[in-house]
Amino acid sequence: MTKNNNKPDINFEQDLWKAANELRGAVAENQYKDYVLSLLFLKYMSEKYEKRKTEIEGLIEEPESEYYTTNTEEKDFWIADEDEYKKAGALVLPEECTWDYLQSNAEQDDIKIKVDSAFSILDEKLAEYKPTLKGLLPPLFVKSQLTATQTGGMINLFSHKKFSLIENPESDIFGRIYEYYIGKFAMAEGSGAGQFFTPGSIVRLLVEMLEPYHGRIFDPACGSGGMFVQSYKFVEAHGGDKGDISLYGQERYEGTLRLAKMNLLIRNLSFELKLGDSLLDDKFPELKADFVIANPPFNVSAWHAEKLPDDDPRLLGPKDEFTTNGNANYMWMQTFWSHLNENGTAGYVMANGAMTTNSKGEKIVRQYMVDNGYIDCIVRLPDKLFMTVAIPTTLFFLSKNRDGNDGKRARMDEILFIDASKLGEMATRRLRVFSEENIAKISDTYHQWRNTDGNYEDIPGFCKAAKLEEVKLNDYKLTPGIYVGSEAEEDDGIPFEEKMGELKEQLKEHFEKSNELQERIMSNLNDM
């Protein structure tokens, strides 16, 4: 279990607000993160270059090193050898592309030109390293309304050591900044329910439960890549090699995909990320992963289910029965399941409503998954875990290793329910986080239940391993409180808007059936 403090991953909201003030009036609010993260990406690539250069210079002076030499030409060769940098995930950068150069010129009138020039140089270097990275860092500053003073102010601000990846290797700085700006300017971003950065403590919990020591990891709604970063940290914390994991992701928004690529590049991870709508245009149709980990945009209506082919291989049954245009939640679940290999496991965030919905195209999928032993575990989460929305959420785990053939305990006839809705600590007035102890309690409960050498026991009010027959008797409802014996609540925690949407969908179905019945009656009358 890795050590995590029960507080936000980094604490620089005041500094980010200062950066926002530099941008205000010159840049649209929904683009703040693009300017900030592009600058920081260049800073991090510059740091990696300088760090590796210093390492090589040290090795050259070390008599026992294979790099050791007193020959000036040989020294210059080692210091300029691009392969020596690439193996450490760094690129050789000319002076005008380094952060020190930009900082020393931050007060110059042409600093915007210098920044965009540095972006262009780095972009060409990245394209040489990997052609699919072309366009990762487009020039932004010259064409913006930012003044030289505003641009220089941002450079000076981000020169603080708290924004240094080397000084703060454990912080997902990219993810935290992305979360901050999405949360602060959600209305300008135009993000719908579920389209937001996943808080660090939820990602850590997912990863601790899945234990992705090695193999293929897939996130079809990868956002800025936070799930991948935490998976890498998990492997590293347990003494593994990051070369043991391969990362695959798909993201609908080009700007967000660029951020994800930056986030993984600065950590020198092996990845393949593609642009597209995973629901309607699966870019990895042949991929079978060991782990699927995701926080998809949930409760999405009008997602054009009619565009799915009738024989889409992800569907568990006939399209008209196993999909609904009113909500894409269970299409996401079918997508996750389809991408698991024979022993794979999926862990993902989902709206609470998915546990009980009776809408056509949703309940039938849930029922199918229960009947066929797909669902491994359900974890109800507390409120206020997300900065941007108040929708109550749940973690779902689907698994293809429930028969015991991979060394885990055979558990096809039961589902583990965990009610974690009372856990978590308030880090701020508006934000709750899971502590290290919370994450350990939940993940250890799952592992003790799942593993052959576990000593799992039901804990009233917290967890229960329920037989499938019990779930069926409860009309296939997956709410943990039904099974663990949580105290009765005044409501089920599902927002009115979500319930209303489900009622509308059901009413629409009733109207359609009514119209069909009227047409049938009229047809029979006309035949008489």
Image (spheres, rainbow, N blue to C red):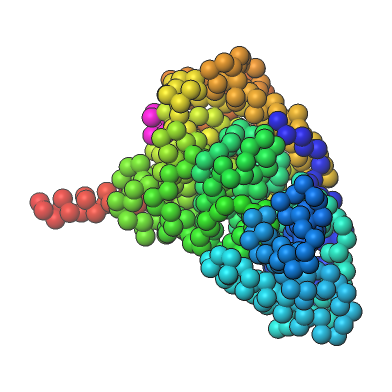
Q: Residue furthest left?
A: 528
Residue 107 part of the magenta-drawn span: no
Q: Residue at x 46, y 26 (%)?
A: 406
The quarter in which the N terminus is drawn is: top right
Residue 140, position as x, y percentages in the image: 70, 77
At x 88%, y 69%, the residue is 156
Q: Which residues are magenta?
A: 367-372
Name the main secondary structure of what is drawn in magenta.
helix
Q: Is residue 278 above or below residue 246?
A: below
- In this figure, what is the number of numbered marks? 0
Q: Position of residue 209 (x, y in %)?
A: 61, 32
Residue 299 point in image, percent of width and height: 54, 50
Decide which of 233, 6 is in the foreground and name it: 233
Q: Is residue 291 visible?
A: yes
Rendering quarter of residue 258: bottom right
**Residue at coordinates 81% horizontally, 51% vertically from top-left?**
62
Q: Image check: 417 left or right of 31? A: left
Among the 4 quarters of the image, the one containing residue 368: top left
Front one among 196 and 151: 151
Q: Position of residue 517 (x, y in %)?
A: 27, 48
Q: Is residue 473 visible?
A: no
